[in-house]
Every structure is written in C-alpha cells, then in structure tokens.
Amino acid sequence: MSKLRAMIMSLALAFPFVLSATEMELVLEVGRENSDLSSASQERIDSTEKKTDRIINEWKVVSKQVEGLKIYNEQKRIQIQAQLELMDKLDDQLTQVVVMQRQIPPLAQRMLEGLEKFVELDLPFHVEERKQRLDLVRSSLSNPKVTASEQVRQILEAYNIEGEYGRKIDAFEAPIIIDGQEIVANVLVIGRIGMFYQTKDERSSGVWDKEVNDWVELDSGYRTAIRDGIRMAKKLAPTDMLMLPIVVKGQS
C-alpha cells in the first residue's frame, strides 16, 4: 500500500495537471481495495494450500494403513487356511483314535492271557507276587473307570517286569518241598536259565526240573558254585563265572 501511494504521489508531482485531488483520492481508494483483495486472495490461497497439504498427508497415512491391512488380511487368510487343513487332519486322527480305542481292550486281553500262560510255564519263582500283579492287571481291564491308556500302561509294565527277571540273578529265602517235606532254603534264580536251592546248612543243593516240575537234588560238586551265586545275587561277592548245570528234558 505504501509503495502504491508513493507511486501515485510521484505521478502527481510529475503530472500535476493530470489528476485533481478528488481523482487522486479515488485512485488511492481503488489501490487500497485492490490491495485488500490481493491480501484476501493470498490468504485464501494459503488456507487452501494448508488444507490441501493436510488432506494429502491424511491420504498418505490412510494409504499406509490400507496397505498394512491388506498385508495383515493376507497373513490371516493363510493362517485360517492352515488352521482349516489342521482341523481336517485332526478329524482324521480322531477317527483313527476311536478305531484304536475299540481295538485296545481285546488286544490287552490277549496280551494278558499270553503273559499268564508264560508265567505258568516259567520257573516258579516269586509266584504269589507275579500272580498278584497279573490279577491287578486283569481287574483293571474289566473296570470301566480305567482308561484304555492306563490299561495298556499296566500290561506293558507287567511285560517289562517279567522281562527284567530274565536279565538278572536273584536270591531269596523261600519254603520249598523236598521229598515231601517243606523246608526254608536259599533259592538262586539266574535269569531264566535255571533255578537252584541250597539248604541253610549248605549240605543239600538242587535244581528245578521243568520236565518233572519238581526239585532234583544235585551232587556236592555244585555246592560251592550255588553258594557263590547266592552271595553274588545278594551283593556279598563280586560277579564271576559260575559252573552250574542246565536241565534239558529232565537230564542234568
């Protein structure tokens, strides 16, 4: 505005005959109006630019959010598809589990019967303990409150214990019948190779004969070996080789 006024004053001084005072004032008024319009227009332009910048920034933010949502939705789509496939597999496995559950009871029953037959034909050591274990397994198989997994666990545990008997030597005191008379003797069990007895005074020793299902007395030559075997089983002597008879078809 000051520049315009200065310009007009310069013109007035240079050409005093051109403009009168009234005309000069009109020119100044027009200049002021033009300047005000120019300022208002610039303000509107600045405001419009600010609004445009704000809208562009908001668009950029929204655009990034949309792009992120697209990636997120794609990941979720893949996860949902994987979950659907897993559900199908689980349905198939559940069907197989149901079939297996139906097969477990008869299988466990056959396993128990086989183990009972094995114990019956095996060397007669820890007889009561082994029968009680089998009776416990049999009662669990007939108990509806016992799960199939627990039934299988018990029958496998019984098999494992019977298997352990065949991999160790054991010695214990037990009542046995010799010539129709019951005595308490030391019994030596070497895996499932043989079972031997020796009286407390070590005067009599013998071996269990599966064929005759009875004890057979041995000559005194095996007395020391049986005594050493009993001491080894009780951890009273280091493990060493034993020379003992193996009964086959009733012959020592």
Image (cartoon, rainbow, N blue to C red):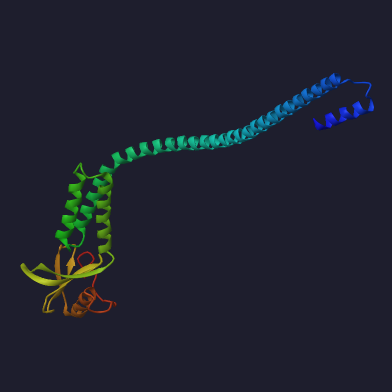
Q: Left of 134 or right of it: where is 4?
A: right
Q: Percent x, y for residue 61?
A: 61, 35
Q: Percent x, y for residue 156?
A: 28, 53
Q: Quadrant of residue 34?
A: top right
Residue at x-position 25% and y-position 44%: 147
**Near-viewer residue (160 or 15):** 15
Q: Quadrant of residue 46?
A: top right
**Near-viewer residue (236 or 195):** 236
Q: Is 209 rendered above or below residue 143? A: below
Residue at x-position 43% and y-position 35%: 88
Residue at x-position 51% and y-position 36%: 76
Q: Percent x, y for residue 119?
A: 20, 57
Q: Quadrant of residue 226?
A: bottom left
Q: Left of 177 or right of it: where is 92?
A: right
Single out the residue that lies furthest toward the left.
181
Viewport quadrant of the C terminus: bottom left
Q: Left of 220 or right of it: where is 36?
A: right
Q: Percent x, y for residue 26?
A: 82, 20
Viewport quadrant of the N terminus: top right
